[in-house]
Image (cartoon, coloured by chain):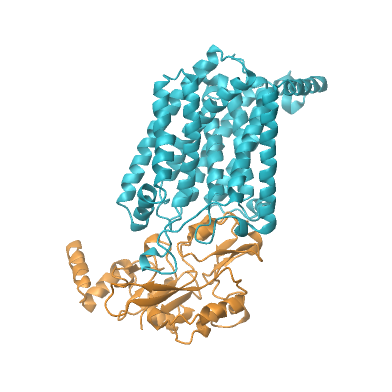
Chain colours: A orange, B cyan
Amino acid sequence: MNWKEFFKNLKTEEQGCVPDETRREFLKIGLIITGVAAGGSLLNVVSVVAEGLATSEELSKEYPYKPHYSMVFRVDRCIDCERCVEACRQTNNVPEYGWRTKILERVDTKAVDQQRQFMPILCNHCNNPPCVRACPTQATYKDKQTGIVKMASYKCIGCKSCMSACPYDARYFNEEKRAIDKCDFCWESRLSKGMKNTACAEACPAGVRIFGDLSDPNSEVYKIVHQMGKAVWVLKPETGAKPNVFYTIG
Amino acid sequence: MERKNNPVVQGVISKEEFTQNWLQFLTEFLSGSKGFYILLILSGLIVFISAMFGVNAIYVGYSHVYGIYREIPWGILISGYVFFVVISTGLSIISSIGHVFGVKSLIPIGKRAVYLSIVTLFAGFMVIFFDVENPFRMAIWNALSPNLTSNIWWMGTLYGISLIFMIFEFLLILLSKHRYATIFGFLTLISKVLAISNLGAVFGMLYGRDFWYGPFIPIYLIASAISSGSTAIIFFTYLGYRIRNERLDKSMELALQVVGKLWALSLAILIFIVFWKIITGLVGSEAQRLAIRELMFGKYAPNFWFFEIFLGLITPFFLLFVSKFRNLNQMFAASLLSFIGIFIMRFDMVVIGQIVYHFFEYKVTDFPVILTYKPTLHEIMLIIGACAFCVFSFLIGEKVFKGHHTEIH
């Protein structure tokens, strides 16, 4: 496919009629997962994967972590009941002044029809995490096996550079721990003890949060992310942090 | 013979000579005027009061007494740290032109500059001590668990090393061992330049923050260092001579003229850099545009136009030319205004980088697009304390080291 065609296709995409074949071609040039319109802007979702791989089988081989933990939000289902936030607080001893996960409220009064949407956020466990690069003492690090961005609290000097570095506002200083605290996909409180799901995902009554292994073709997160029927996007893709938290509708 | 070549390491300086030197320092120190001691006590008192604020902050918890919060984790203390260490770096750069690279006209300012460089770096460390939540852990884990991709690690380590080099450099200058002092001066210069570029990269490498990201801040800070260093030399040399009630000799006058010219050049470069940062920022990503717009036309506009541009850049530049690099009173006025401007520049650089809310583009109602940060009394007192520490140490230095006179060989 030459550049002329490429731009032509981009134009058609805006009009909302992209032939499947073209989409497949588009994937092959390296963007693997394509995000479509979200909030009016086109987002390319490139989280992990090596370029030029098209089939799911090849993709899963290329994921750098096993299990490659990930979360998908079906945002339109969220009703802001905050059970997830509460479950997180209880499970991970999150104090009143902080949060590991939060639900933001989006309002667009100029939108046609629905003008409000809730947008849950948490640590995106990025594959290229700015916080890990910035930490002077390796107090925060990317777990080599699971890809979870964890904290070694005893090493944290409290310089707050990871807070400054994080594009997702995912970190806060925990006074009791004397260290930065953040979501670890419930590693310490649940996963390391053999449980399979995070507290927030389990508490959600509307099935907004789906947690699982992005590299396992049988997992639900895999199935949602590796499909082309519905838009899947990540937040702030322009930072290049390559997040592992995805958003979709439905 | 060999022992004589290396007097400090070999410990050749006799005990009597050493004691005599210190006694001399003491007598010098006791020879000040009334005004000198009043200023000294006053600055000492401010340092003490600020230290109490710092201790209180540690006791109560920083988050309860500082204006910083989750979304704006770096405040005026980080600005203060940058302010002091950039001055310190600038002092090292400018003094090294004389006593490391042998430009004779700049040798007279060398001793004072090295001394003040130690003082300002120490002031920077004092400020950061009260910003970092676990400073004692820092000492341990910086050494045991270094992250070599972290610019903060490099910056902190290099500044730490440079402090040791500088102390040696200064002691060797005092002992008139100029050859060894030159070696340490060179090592100081290298470590400081590497440190300041990493300091810039602490901000410039944060790819989640559009206002900071890129090579601009390291370049800006190195140009700023030359400007800040010149400001400090002119400011403190002028005051030093005032305090000692001495007239400037010819060589010092010439040295200050050279510093003035270097300063004017660095100001011109800075104006150029700032101009292009603004222009490129205005057409950049939305986050960057919002930040720059806030700086130029929003709540920070007085900071930017009046303090940064007018006081920090344009007026000193203008005054330097009016003074023809000779009128010391005008150059001193320029340095005083410039100091104020430079501090606000550091404040804006740190704060503006964080004021655009992370998820502003999603029309989130939980936070405004532009966040606010207001420094608290505790934070301000710590900055004032660090400034007072510089004044206090400067005053002591002037007396004890007899106006930092240097003989030119």
Q: Residue furthest right?
A: B16
Q: Residue furthest bottom?
A: A205
Tell me: residue A179, above or below residue A224.
above
Which of these two is toward me, B11 or B255? B255
Number of numbered discs on residues: 0
Task: Describe residue A234's horizontal placement relative to residue B89 as left or right.
Answer: left
Tell me: residue B193, above or below residue B25.
below
Residue A181 pos. (x, y %): 58, 66
Residue B265 visible to the viewer: no
Residue drawn at point x = 36 percent, y = 65 percent: B361
Residue B33 pos. (x, y %): 69, 21
Query: What is the quadrant of residue A157 in the picture?
Result: bottom right
Tell me: residue B239, above or below residue B137.
above
> Which quadrant does the N terminus of chain B fall into?
top right
Residue B44 visible to the viewer: yes
Tell me: residue B153, above or below residue B365.
above
Residue drawn at point x = 48 percent, y = 87 percent: A205
Which of these two is toward me, B39 or B193? B39
Task: Describe residue A5's horizontal placement relative to residue B236 as left or right.
Answer: left
Task: Describe residue B177's horizontal placement relative to residue B335 as left or right.
Answer: right
Residue drawn at point x = 64 percent, y = 44 percent: B126
Residue A124 pos. (x, y %): 47, 69
Residue A140 pos. (x, y %): 57, 62
> Which quadrant does the C terminus of chain B fall into?
top right
